[in-house]
Amino acid sequence: MALLKKNQNLMNLIKRVHSVVENADIEKHRQSQDYFGALLGNNKEAAIREITIEGMYGEWVSVNRAHMKKYVVLYCHGGGYSTGSSLYARTLTTKLAMSTSMDVLSFDYRLAPEHPYPAALEDAMMAWNYLMLLGYGARDVIIAGDSAGGNLALALVHKLKEEERILPRGLVLMSPWTDLTSSGKSHETRKDVDPVLHREYLEQMIRNYADGQELTNPLISPLFGDFADFPSTYIQVGDNEVLLNDSTMLHKKMVKANVPVQMDVFKGMWHVFQMSPFKTAYEAMEKNAEFIYDICR
């Protein structure tokens, strides 16, 4: 009972923090997220190096110690395709760089509604091509992402597959948004406990990004794609989020397609809980690192 109360208090806190960030004015929403990213993503152990990829802002996040150079993580940030940035994602990219001892490349893809689909995917492909030009092989790259960034990571692999290019070594997905048709039952069963996402917000994000588009297009809703020959994948999702089934349905489809896939459902956790500065978030990042080490052997 005490544990349940503690979890409820935590949920209420997350709800309050999230309501501070969320704003009907999209520009203010973006600024609030960047402010939180600057506040919580600062780490003395991590170094940030800013770059430009064909006019697009990007940053390398590295640990200030000897670390692995052969493999690299390409990171796609979340934010419903309408908000978010590399700065906002530092709450995740710094943890990822520290737990894996690998360099992490994050990039600021163009955002909706100013730049709807396929702008983000085109920019993700630009970041991928940049890594190839630097001399990394496709199999030296792990693509990671949270929420809409998880969607983008999957869409990028679908696109690479469509173009018959070599696929990355693996995928790490945190609370991925895989289905813009919102077919998962968890949209109903978790709507009263999810402290972060709600129907109106998701509907607005879908309109911003994919208005007038066919939502079952695998490059928009990766869940509907063909997963044959997809790389090893690790999925993390919170038990208290409306997007829970976006992960469980993806896991099921990947298993059916014989993809080497693992999934962890974190009890009592919410959407992209890994951003929070507390024990379970760090443990989840360690699990991400273990998966990455495992596939890079």
Image (cartoon, helix red, strand yellow):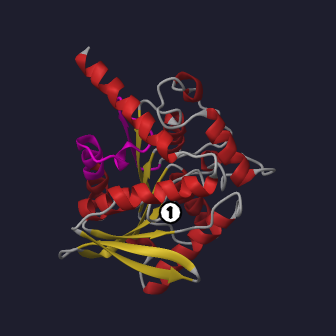
Asked if residue 222 can be seen in this view, the reply is yes
How far from the left and from the top, in percent, is residue 24?
63, 46
Q: Residue at (73%, 52%) from the top-left corner?
A: 210
Q: Nearer the viewer, residue 70 or 161?
A: 70
Q: Amino acid at mark 1?
A: Ser
The 10 Å Cα crowd at callout 1, few under 14, some 14 to 19, many 20 or more, is many
How far from the left and from the top, in percent, is residue 222?
61, 50
Q: Residue furthest left?
A: 66
- Disc 1 target residue: 85
Query: Along the horizontal axis of the image, is 60 left or right of 222?
Result: left
Q: Residue at (46%, 44%) from the top-left corner?
A: 175
Q: Residue at (63%, 41%) from the top-left corner?
A: 202
Q: Residue at (41%, 55%) from the top-left corner?
A: 36
Q: Tell me the quadrant of the picture where the C terminus can be found.
A: bottom left
Q: Quadrant of residue 125?
A: bottom right
How far from the left and from the top, in percent, is residue 47?
29, 74
| Residue at disc 1, secondary structure | loop
Q: Is residue 128 above or below residue 248?
A: below
Q: Which residues are magenta?
A: 259-286
Q: Nearer the viewer, residue 209 or 216?
A: 209
Q: Quadrant of residue 236?
A: top left
Q: Nearer the viewer, residue 153 or 140?
A: 153
Q: Is residue 86 above or below residue 192?
A: below
Q: Is residue 245 above or below residue 56?
A: above
Q: For residue 281: magenta?
A: yes
Q: For residue 269: magenta?
A: yes
Q: Is residue 214 above or below residue 94?
A: above
How far from the left and from the top, in percent, is residue 20?
48, 43
Asked if residue 295 can be seen in this view, the reply is no
Q: Tell me the quadrant of the picture where the N terminus can be found.
A: top left
